Amino acid sequence: RKEVEQDPGPFNVPEGATVAFNCTYSNSASQSFFWYRQDCRKEPKLLMSVYSSGNEDGRFTAQLNRASQYISLLIRDSKLSDSATYLCVASGGSNYKLTFGKGTLLTVNP
Amino acid sequence: NAGVTQTPKFQVLKTGQSMTLQCAQDMNHNSMYWYRQDPGMGLRLIYYSASEGTTDKGEVPNGYNVSRLNKREFSLRLESAAPSQTSVYFCASREGTEAFFGQGTRLTVV
């Protein structure tokens, strides 16, 4: 079983839609969690960290449920510029390892 | 501010040839990483270095070696390239939360 698993997608949504991505992690020692965004043929870039209390950054909301080992990302009022691959990331304990999910491709259509 | 610099950006190798992918960061980060990205597989960790002088295997280390030359530089070596190593390779560095990625090296082994 992969350490970080995501919705396989792809997701195709119209502009203005709300879309949710789900992710689970298997290593209970994981301590830090992130969502990264990767545009086509570019490097991944940090979108936001994920905290147990949940956190919001504009149209983006991230949630973490440690008991279920589940992470989510909600995008409200989707824009064309949100089209990208979204990567769920877990970082474990003291070994500094960053483990990525396979990513979910989002296409926002006009 | 260069961030993470990878060289080369593109490379074609013949089976059995060797090469070294170079990575340097100017952010004084302790942790550095090498990933490969293949279609449908996401980012898979090859090797990482939590700090200068230490390296550890990731998920797919076979066929690769690494050197953490100093705090700035972390190189990835393919001793005898195989077609299965055709991929996009990303180097990253991290201190605390966010990992910063280089622009990637597109390697084709024929």
Image (cartoon, rainbow, N blue to C red):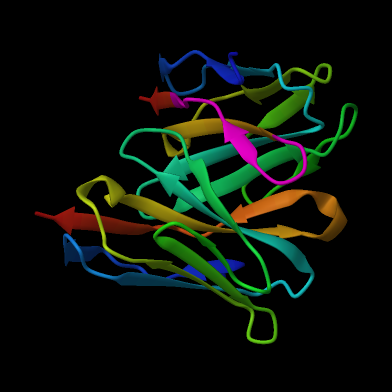
On the picture, is B36 further left or further right than B98?
left
Give the camera-side residue of A96 and B68: A96
| x and y, in percent, of residue A68 in the image | 63, 86
| x and y, in percent, of residue A78 in the image | 26, 59
The outermost residue toward the front is A58
On the picture, is B66 further left or further right than A101?
right
Instruction: Count the labels in the image.
Output: 0
On the picture, is A107 further left or further right than A74?
left
The outermost residue toward the bottom is A67
**Residue B13, visible in the rendered structure:** no
Q: Is residue B90 above or below residue B10?
A: below
Q: Which residue corresponds to the image point at 36% horizontal and 55% vertical from the top-left?
A: B40
Q: Quadrant of residue A71?
A: bottom right
**Residue A88, visible in the rendered structure:** yes
B63 drawn magenta: no
Q: What range of the chain is rendered magenta? A: B94-105
The outermost residue toward the left is A110
Q: Which residue corresponds to the image point at 42% horizontal and 25% vertical from the top-left?
A: B107
Q: Which residue corresponds to the image point at 70% horizontal and 39% vertical from the top-left?
A: B47
| x and y, in percent, of residue B52 in the image | 87, 27
Quadrant location, the C terminus of chain A:
bottom left
Q: Which residue corresponds to the image point at 73% horizontal and 50% vertical from the top-left?
A: A97
| x and y, in percent, of residue B16 in the image | 51, 21
Give the camera-side residue of A70 and B80: A70
Q: Is residue A79 above or below residue B82?
A: below
Quadrant location, the N terminus of chain A:
bottom right
Q: Quadrant of residue B53?
A: top right
